[in-house]
Image (spheres, grey):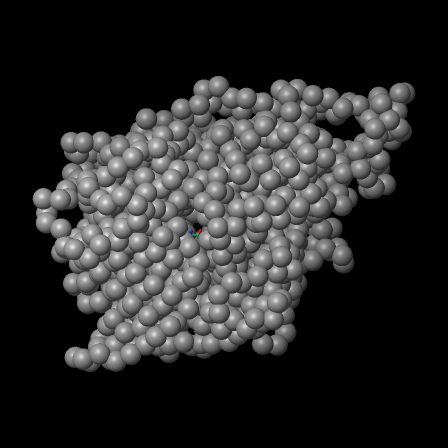
Amino acid sequence: MRTETPPTIRLKDYKPSDYLIDHVSLDVALQPTATGVVSILKMRPNPASRTVNAPVRLDGEALELKSVAINGETIGDNRYTLTENQLIIDDVPEGQFELTIETQCNPDANTALSGLYRSNDVYCTQCEAEGFRRITYFLDRPDVLATYQVRVEADRDTVPVLLANGNPVETGELADGRHFAVWQDPWPKPSYLFALVAGDLACVTDHFTTVSGRKVELRIYVEQGKQDRCDWAMQSLKASMAWDETAFGREYDLDIFMIVAVSDFNMGAMENKGLNVFNDKYILARADTATDQDYVNIEAIIAHEYFHNWTGNRITCRDWFQLCLKEGLTVFRDQEFTSDMRSRAVKRIQDVRTLRSHQFPEDAGPLAHPVRPQSYIEINNFYTATVYEKGAEVVRMFKTLLGAEKFAKALNIYFDRHDGDAATVEDFVTCMEEASGRDLAQFFNWYNHAGTPSVNTRLDWDQAAATATLTVSQSLSATPGQSEKPDMHIPLATGLIGPDGADMELVLSDGQRIDSGILELRSAKQSWTFSGITDRPVLSINRGFSSPVNLTTGQRDEDLLFLMANDHDAFNRWEAGQTLSRSIIMSAMQAIKDGDEPDVIDDYADALASVLASQELEPAFKAQMLALPSEADIANMQGRNVNPDLIQSARDQVRKAVGGRLAEQLESLAGDLPAGDYSPSATAAGQRALAYAALSLLGAAEPAKTAAAALSRFEAARHMSDMMGPLNMLAGLDVAERDQALDMFHQRFTDDHLIVDKWFSLHAMRKGPDAAAHIRALMQHDDFSITRPNRVRALIGTFAGMNQTGFNSASGDGYDVLAEVVMALDERNPQVAARMVSAFRSYQLMDRVRQDKARTALGLIRDKQNLSADTLEMVSRMLD
Ligand code: TRP
Ligand code: ZN
């Protein structure tokens, strides 16, 4: 066990830095095991700091210090103190001075993938959140903004490409087969946006002309031989640049924009100024290697990182507590981008699915934290669904409350006022208040309070008076560290639908009309009485998922069926189907427990049938209608004493019944694929999504027959999407065709690491009690490697995150596998290890037996020698 507990950082303790760094000149001499770094810092006292003559305390980690000089004069080691993670210089000149620091680091020994490391012989850096301190001693905090000049030097033959942020200014040859390049970034930036990449990389180029007519060179760097997999990424980049100009008035600000794809990366991608670094899985795509989902992800993540140039880079965060300021807003922006590029309704549904499957469980369990946390031990543990996805929901609610026009005005104020700043959430909200003239103090609770509010509604129609009274109440349960909860300010997009399917006018009894349809719930209980309601209305509330809440309307099945068929809000049409099918699954669970026959679900199946037959609805939307709530969703709804096996049986039964009833229609849809060559367009992908959703339901209804058909479809497929459709279906069945198809798939793509990852993920979805044993066996496979984050996530991440019954097996085997992997990973890569722990986040929902097993597994991790602060923090929160 550790002896000392790592310190807790608190928002309330924020203090401006005692010093500022105006300019950094870095000289990096790359060598695999001994890279030399000379850093010259132009420093001065921070006028905003209250401390005079403070010591200079620079952060540093895993560095070898060679020398320190002040204003060009080397100082002896009596003039500084070196601790495990700081270089402290007590006495520095008054006013401006120049600090020169010479250090050495070891990229090959850097398995944490934070700082400077090598992946596949390519040198690359990852500095967010606190990785720059692993390259040189620095004030490694986001409110210290400097301009950078970077000279990179390396062996010419093995490392021909030398990149850093900003514009290229010089290159040249050196003795001993070495060469160098100099890059200059004119935009002041925090150290977390620093990047350097060097290696034998291939380059694909293009250009983009900005609204003001500036020509920007675009470059995508990839592994040699992968140049033909960059077209989609490049197209997505250009689309993102154009969209940010038209949708947000934001233009790019350097002469060059570069993206590098690397194969070992702790997360998805990183927005370093002018030099984004990506996990190659989010860049490389060709029809025969990438699925529709890959294409969609690439488009969205390229957009996300590009949009950070304004929301994150030009306006950055004052401290890491403000992370949602850049991430929530940037996720909101990438969601809007995808909505404009593809189907808005389908995008909203998918985002809500993600929110429900990742963020709601987080918010309901031991890891719950506010969108803006108050404290952390390791900031890397707070790159969460709450900060990102719920953070985006909060931005979306501003838009709902203010209306599109005022919201746009607020953002313009934000961009104008804070360009070049390290800003706070308060700064952002102030812009919203100014643009709207509204007091948003109560709304601010969304930033400070964890947990998903519950909202209950009741609609009373008084036929004689021709009024309808809507009563809405809210409640929010205690979350870790927060026992008292305030009333939240909850915007609810609402409609009352008449028997003809049209929305009625919302006129309050005092005559006030609510044209926007937005009701604002601000107290524990509120009611609205609408007049002129001569027919029985059906309530459609929280349209478009206007607020991230758990809603209970208590509506009868007929009303849900009516909404499925009639609501003009596409999201709520889908939502009605989800609510109805969830309750059907829940009663099937009860029936199984009681030994009864499960309910008939004819009405629900009929409603689906008419959705499928509709001429107006798009295929991608129909595909969403066909997909039942996930097993995890149902567990979350159930809330306690969960038996995942029972959920799975009930859900499978419902799928089987629906699939059987719709078989004829599904058969025809399953065969209806776009003609011609592969296109990743929303239309073509939507048609495939529907075909494979249909195939999947058929698989539930008639496994033997469908499996045989799926195998031949897999063999005949001409691109990856048409392979993965049948494979996904087969992976969930216990049939010989599954194993045949998986073996063929592996043989065919052994040399393609991204596809081998897919193969591992498919295996991880195996149902049944032997899943954990299967995972253990696969960990012995030659292609498995604990040193590759993508591989670990593909096998272990998919298993723990997506395979409910396998991971939560009553034997505790699934938990043990995860604990073993976390412990094996922790010394190498604490960030990834700690992230894997979050798969335990819902263990308290489970029945006693499972809870105990999970707690035992977590305890094993906690008691391991030398556990990283990252993993310790996660495990402790989970066990508290
Ligand atoms: N800021 C990045 C994004 O949202 C994500 C990120 C944070 C990251 N820390 C990281 C990526 C560490 C890789 C490694 O796009
Ligand atoms: Zn981001």
Give me the residue at 22% from left, 61% from top.
37
From the image, which quarter does the N terminus lie in? top left
Residue 726 x, y percent position in the rendering: 50, 62
Q: Is 811 on the left-hand or right-hand side of 212?
A: left
Q: Residue at x 34, y 75 (%)?
A: 170
Q: Picture quarter containing residue 476? A: top right
Please report the residue visible at 68 percent of the width from the left and 34 percent of the height from the top: 437
Residue 193 visible somewhere in the drawing: no
Residue at coordinates 48% horizontally, 69% vertically from top-left? 255
Residue 465 drawn above or below residue 182: above
Place of residue 320 in the rendered image (x, y in percent of width and height, measured from the top left): 40, 41
Residue 775 point in image, percent of width and height = 31, 51
Which image quarter is the C terminus in?
top left
- Looking at the image, residue 8 sits to the left or right of residue 79; the answer is right
Quick one: 610 or 349, which is closer to the camera?
A: 349
Asked where in the image residue 536 lies, by quadrant, the reply is top right
Kindly tell me whether residue 233 is visible in this rendering: yes
